[in-house]
Every structure is written in structure tokens, then in C-alpha cells.
Amino acid sequence: MESYRSDEIEIDLMDLTKYYLSRWYIFVLAIIVGTGAVGLLGLMKTGKAGTVYSASVTYHIGIKSAGDGNMLSDDVLLGYIGDSVYVSGSQSVLDAVVEKLDLKCEGRDLLNSLTVQRVPDSYYVILTVRNTDEKMAVSIADAIAEETCKCMTERNPGINAAIYDHTGPEPVKEGNSGKLMLCGGILGFLAVLMALSVIYVKKEIRK
């Protein structure tokens, strides 16, 4: 029979396990309460913040004749496409968007709601903006894409950058609510485990 011995008491691990199992309903209740509490807090937070909308703009970067009549190589073009991802989130582009739309924030504040990703094996980049105002989500996404294309074309005469397509606005589905509820259930379980362990130890000490 396995046991754990300290200077004060000896704990029978088998007896401790039976003690936990005999109170299984407490664990179940704690998991339900923990999961429900976190889920409720998530709903309250979502309701307070309002529905979040996502608007996306796809822009395309292609090759045009350079000033000296030579065409850019495909490798160089792909490098420019990669650069455009960083240009979209640059301070100069975001500041220009804030000024253009007369937003009551600073350019760097837009980074929290901006996602820019390059479409693999293509000349396309998708820029997505999240906002509680669906019209504003579209306006900001359009403005950032326009400023990015303008900036890339001015810096690199051998390319042509232009908006290709629009998507949204669409309501955003929060993907982390399930994980949060799982964490709530786990925390409830651990809390009961610790509480019952303390009660069991105190009971053994009194013997």
C-alpha cells in the first residue's frame, strides 16, 4: 500500500484517492460552475464591446516596365510583395490613414485591429481590419490598402500595385471562447482538489 509520510502524519494514497472518488459530485459541480462562470463573463464582455466586424481588401503587385526599359525579375518582385506586408503596418501608412479618415486615434493604434498576410505562391496580399463599426472597418481597410499601393508604387518604379478585391464586412466569430471555458472547468477542478486535500489532511491530523 503506497503512502506518503511527513514529520506529522502518514497519508495513505489509496485512502486519499477513495476520499476524492467518494466526493465526485463536488468535482462535477465545480467543473460546471467554472465553465459556466467563464462562459458568462465572455458573453458579458462580448455584449459590452458589441459585435466586431471584419473587412478584407486584397491587393496585387505586378511587374511593369522599369525606367530603363528592363523588366524586373520574378525574384525581385516576390521580394517587393514581402516588403508590402510590412509597409501596410508601417507608421507612415497608418498615420496617413488616420489623417485621411480623420480618426480620433494614433496610427499605431490601428495595429491592434490589423492583420496582413501574403497569399502563398501568388502576387496577392490580403489585408484585414476588425472594428465594431462595419462601415469603419471597410473604410480603414480600403484606406490602408490604397496607401500601401501608393507607397509601393512610388518607391519602386518597376512595379504596379493596385487593389484587386474586397470582402466583408462580416461579423467575427470569436474562436477562443471554447478554450476559455475549458480553462474555467480545469480551474474549478483544481480548486476543489486543493480544498479537499486540505480538508483530508486536517482530518488526518485530528486522528
Image: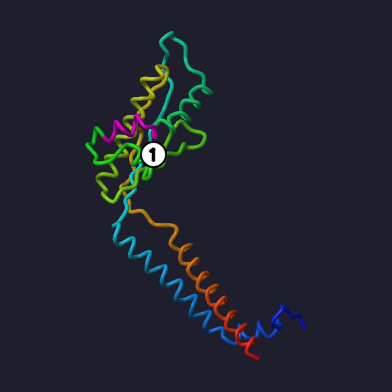
Relative vertical location of residue 5 with respect to residue 102 in this rendering, above or below: below
The answer to whether 129 is drawn above or below residue 17 in the figure is above
4 and 60: which is toward the camera: 4
Residue lying furthest left: 102
Where residue 143 sits: x, y (%)? 29, 34
Q: Which residue is drawn at 24% across and 41% down?
A: 104
Q: In this view, does 57 lie above or below 82?
A: below
For residue 4, above or below residue 149: below
Label 1 packing within 10 angstroms: few (<14), some (14-19), many (20+)? many
- Give the number of marks: 1
Give the quadrant of residue 2.
bottom right
Along the line of sight, the residue nearer the viewer: 202 or 144: 202
Which residue range is magenta in the image?
A: 88-98
| Image point (33%, 65%), residue name | 44
Residue under the image location 28 percent in, 51 percent down: 132
Q: What element carries label 1?
A: strand
Q: In this view, does 61 lie to the left or right of 15?
A: left
Q: Is the magenta stretch mostly helix, strand or loop?
A: helix
Q: Say which amino acid is labelled 1.
A: Leu
Q: Circle 1 is placed at which residue position?
A: 127
Give the image location of residue 154, x and y in percent.
36, 20
| Residue placed furthest toward the bottom | 207
Which quarter shows the N terminus?
Answer: bottom right
Q: Where is residue 45 in the image (x, y as percent from the top left)?
A: 34, 61
